[in-house]
Every structure is written in structure tokens, then in C-alpha cells.
Image (tube, grey):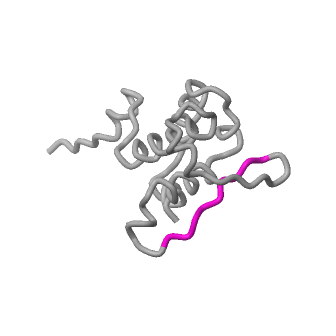
Amino acid sequence: MIMYYIGDDLKKLHWLDVRKRVVFKLALLAHKAIVGSAPEYLQEMFRYSHHGHSLKLIVPHAYSLAGQRSFSVIGPKIFNNLPLSVQSCSTSNSFKSALKTYLFSLSTQDLEKFYS
């Protein structure tokens, strides 16, 4: 019996698995909101806090499970957990490239930090 693992094919194709793809899409949307290329209603969801030279997004308190899953809560959580080298990308293309490279380096356990 031959064991087949889809993860090997995903790496060959340079594709992210589903959970990493969700993080990728949410982080990209948050980045676009920060740099001003997302619709205005998304840009208005974020509040900023400057700590030294780094930009942090304020994560609003959510009172329900549905609230914890909303973009206004999960977007800042994901963006704040990215390394500064990824956060500081000024264009969407450079951000996507750096983010994808970073996500490929993460294990499944490391991915959990984005949701906590």
C-alpha cells in the first residue's frame, strides 16, 4: 500500500494548505486596509497604536464567539502576530511574497498563535 500525503504536492506547487490560505487572505486584506487600498469601510474597522517604531492594531474586545471570528477582531490579531519584516512591506506584491514565504516556514502548531 502506497501512502500518499497531499502536503508534499502542495509544497511542490508552492501552494498553501487551507488553514494557511485563510490566514494569508485575512492578513492581505488587513494590509490593504492599512495602506489604503481596501474599501473605506474596511479601513475604518482598524484603530492604531504606535509602540516605538512599530505599528500595532488595537484588537477590540469581542463578547461572543461570532464576534471573535469577525474581521474587525481577527484581522488585527493576525496582522499583529506577523514578523516586522512582513508587516513593514509597503506594496501588496511585496507583502504577499513575504507573507507566503513566512507562512511556508510555519508548522501547524505555530499557526495556532494567529487565532489566540
In terms of depth relative to the viewer, which is nearer, 68 or 110?
68
In terms of depth relative to the viewer, which is nearer, 75 or 46?
46
Q: Residue at x 58, y 39 (%)?
A: 31
Position of the N terminus, as image quadrant, is top left
Question: Quick one: which residue is furthest to the left in this view?
Answer: 1
Q: Specify whether 44 is left or right of 66.
A: right
Q: Residue at x 28, y 40 (%)?
A: 6
Q: Specify whether 75 is left or right of 47.
A: left
Q: Position of residue 111 (x, y in %)?
A: 49, 54
In terms of depth relative to the viewer, which is nearer, 29 or 1?
29
- Per the image, is 56 magenta? yes
Q: Specify whether 96 is left or right of 66.
A: right
Task: Count numbered badges in the picture.
Answer: 0
- Per the image, is 109 magenta? no
Q: Which residues are magenta?
A: 54-62
Q: Position of residue 41 (x, y in %)?
A: 50, 44
Question: Quick one: which residue is furthest to the right in this view?
Answer: 52
Looking at the picture, does residue 79 appear above or below residue 32?
below
Q: Position of residue 50 (x, y in %)?
A: 78, 52
Q: Specify whether 83 is left or right of 102.
A: right
Looking at the picture, does residue 110 appear above or below residue 9?
below
Looking at the picture, does residue 99 appear above or below residue 79?
above
Q: Position of residue 105 (x, y in %)?
A: 54, 42
Q: Residue at x 43, y 66 (%)?
A: 67
